[in-house]
Image (spheres, rainbow, N blue to C red):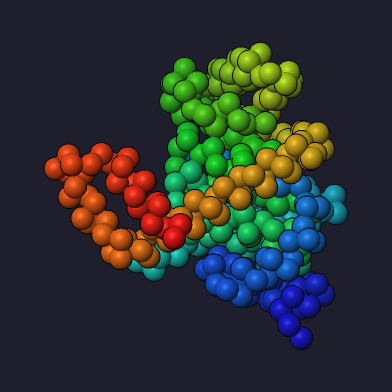
Amino acid sequence: MGLLARLANGDRLALARLATYVENRDPIGIEAIERLYPRTGRALTIGLTGPPGAGKSTLINSLTDIWRARGKSIGIIAIDPTSPISGGATLGDRIRVKERHLDDGVFMRSMASRGRKGGLAPATASMIHLLDAAGFDRILVETVGVGQDEIDVAELVHLTVLLQIPGGGDGVQALKAGVLELADIFVVNKADLPGADLLARELSGIAALSSSLDPLGDAAAPVVRVSATTGDGVEKLVDEIERIGARNNNDLARERIARAEISAIVVEEIRQRLQWHANEFELASLAEDAADRSVSPRQAAERLLASLSR
């Protein structure tokens, strides 16, 4: 029986094998997504981002407990920094959820960022499609946690949850972070620590300001206080995710997600073609011409792009 047939029958080993092909952008994985894509679009997708040490993985465990109790199956994509030794992802997140290996309603995949900026891995969108086609009800995408500029995830999911902790820095500086403007829910983790009240007020102010500037007039993003370790407040967070997810899961969001994925594929294709043809079309020569000012960098780039279309 082929991998896709086994996947349709709920075979988790087939899912794991396909996930490896998809992550490595193997032709088998690419073909699998092409064939599975018509079966996608059912899952609610949630991005979870925030700084390192904010407790994203612990919160995912708590969210998973509640969703499983409600009868929902959970797919988890954890984006980790690329290992300088193996080139793969670190296994910290997978180790933290190892107690779920007997639960067929939960599937966890750690993916290496492979140098991509924005907190995601190159094959994140395809992995979402794979888990969606496998029948998971809720798909969580945990970003690398590189800082405040992880806005890529917001383009690929139905809603984005931003996790913050007290004492994480100057709240006024956070106003400059693009992800704060795109978050659908703000979460204050470790809410029993000093400074949690101040952080919640600052985030509420940011949410109100973003809402006032929103041409669509959406309500301000809620601020939910939780303790991921004890589980306090996580039930309320799940309710908010379900409420906003139902609102955001519409044709407009589906078109936004499709547009972002198409654009990413085009950019990646151009990057690969440029890398493949760099020597053939004398990139080095064009760089020398630009360096001695006989052509501008834009003129050199346009010549190179023109050569790719031949």
Q: Give the image location of residue 127, x and y in percent.
A: 63, 60
Residue at the right extreme, as displayed: 71
Residue at the left extreme, as displayed: 292
| Side (left or right) of 84 relative to 195 | left
| Side (left or right) of 120 relative to 97 | left
Disc tally is 0
Confirm whether residue 198 shows in the render.
Answer: yes
Q: Nearer the viewer, residue 81 or 267?
A: 267
Q: Give the image location of residue 261, x and y in percent.
A: 61, 50
Give the residue at x 62% y 54%. Answer: 125
In the image, is residue 248 above or below residue 18?
A: above
Confirm whether residue 157 shows in the render.
Answer: no
In the image, is residue 1 above or below residue 157?
A: below
Give the residue at x 75% y 37%. Answer: 252
Residue at the bottom extreme, as displayed: 1
Q: Nearer the viewer, residue 112 or 252?
A: 252
In the image, is residue 240 above or below residue 284?
A: above
Give the residue at x 23% y 41%. Answer: 295
Residue at the front extreme, as displayed: 310
In the image, is residue 264 above or below residue 17?
A: above
Q: Give the image location of residue 98, x and y in percent.
A: 62, 64
Q: Give the image location of residue 40, x and y in percent.
A: 77, 57
The C terminus sits in image quarter: bottom left
The N terminus sits in image quarter: bottom right
Q: Nearer the viewer, residue 65 or 204?
A: 204
Give the residue at x 70% y 25%. Answer: 222
